[in-house]
Amino acid sequence: MKNKTLIFSLAFLLVAVLLFALPSHKETAITAMSLPLAGKQLKNEVAEKELIKKFRHENTWLQEIKSKQNWVNNDVIKVPKQGAAPNVLINNQVYPIVSNKREDDYVTLSLNKYETENTEVTADELYALAYEKLSDVQVQHREELEDKTASHALYSISPDKKTAQTPILETTGDADENGRKKLTSKDVINLKKALDKLAVPKKGRVLVLCSDHVADLLEEDRNFKTQYQNAIDGVISKSYYGFTTYESLDTPEYNDSLEKLPFESLNTGRTASVAFFKNNTAKATGSVKRFMRAEEDDPEYRKNTLGFRLYFICVAIKDEGQAALVSGKAA
């Protein structure tokens, strides 16, 4: 009798422990719902980190510009503006030496927002293809963002119009079949002289040539042709009349008044090459967001939908060093 009572007590105790250890139906439901959401969030975070990691603008003129991530907070960049520089005294005999306070300031700018249009990949495509199309689509989105930010960056740091601090020179070579005057090595020398007069430091000058001007120099300057053929990592020459020289297919265009046309304007202007002093420019990347709807969440069409949003900026901190060579027109 005692043995039966003991067995019954132990069985009751075991059932009680099991009931206490098991989660309630409500807790089980919450856990089951949160797991897929956590998985999606993790996949997005991994894809976003991967995009930032590989977002480098390698082998382009943009690699010359220093990244200022420490200036960015909440997709806003706070650009410092230095106050007046001190005077330098030579063989001073007057004391006490004058003391001045340097008044610095800041310019606050929102980073530009770049968004890709969505790409759709159906479940049938993924089943039939021999490669991972979704991964390939993500790489394509990153490359398009790199191209667009680079072309917009060059537009942003090029001079808006000709001023005393931002020289814009017209090319002076022979006219081609369209009446465009070709760029000559002498024009590049004249650009160097213009920056010399403005006391732009010689170390750190960068010249980004448009395709027309590259072709002109290849035709006219044998030394440039040799350097172009031996280009490494996108750099044409590290000492072409004092400029580190690159080529770009996406340079800004100017009108006949030598004013810059709007970015991606439908109007055709004059082709131009852009020069800048790299220490007076800055770039920064802000947040990136992947937008993804998986085929499991689209029972009607059973397709994956993917897109990205990226914040980025490239700006000229000072006008000093901004310049352009604009194609001249035959009379």
Image (tube, grey):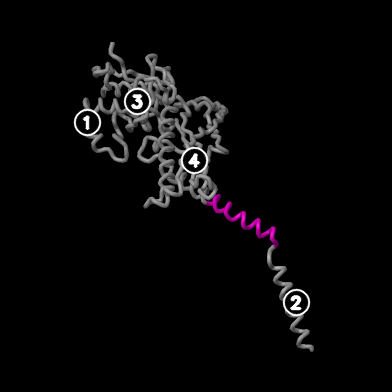
Q: Label for residue 223?
A: 1
**Which label's residue is closer to the chain start, 2 or 3?**
2
Q: Which residue ends up furthest to the left in the rendered image?
A: 222
Give the residue number, with chain letter if any, for mark 2.
12
Dot 3: within a 10 Å radius of its alpha carbon, few (fewer than 14), some, or many (20 or more) residues? many
**Which label's residue is closer to the chain start, 2 or 4?**
2
Q: Nearer the viewer, residue 94 or 194?
A: 194
Q: Give how far across and how far down residue 90 sits, in percent.
A: 44, 26
Q: Amino acid at mark 1?
A: Asn
| Left or right placement of residue 122 versus residue 193 in this view | right
In the picture, the quarter occupied by the N terminus is: bottom right
**Which label's residue is closer to the chain start, 4 or 3?**
3
Q: What is the distance, in whole Å, between disc 1 and disc 3 at their CAs?
A: 19 Å
Dot 1: within a 10 Å radius of its alpha carbon, few (fewer than 14), some, or many (20 or more) residues? few
Tell me the residue at 30%/24% (across/down). 188
Q: Amino acid at mark 4?
A: Phe
Q: What is the distance, in whole Å, between disc 4 and disc 3 at their CAs?
A: 31 Å
Q: Amino acid at mark 2?
A: Phe
In the image, which residues are magenta?
A: 24-42
Secondary structure of the residue carrying numbered label 3: strand
Give the residue number, with chain letter if any, for mark 4.
308
| Left or right placement of residue 91 versus residue 9 in this view | left
Tell me the residue at 47%/30% (across/down). 315
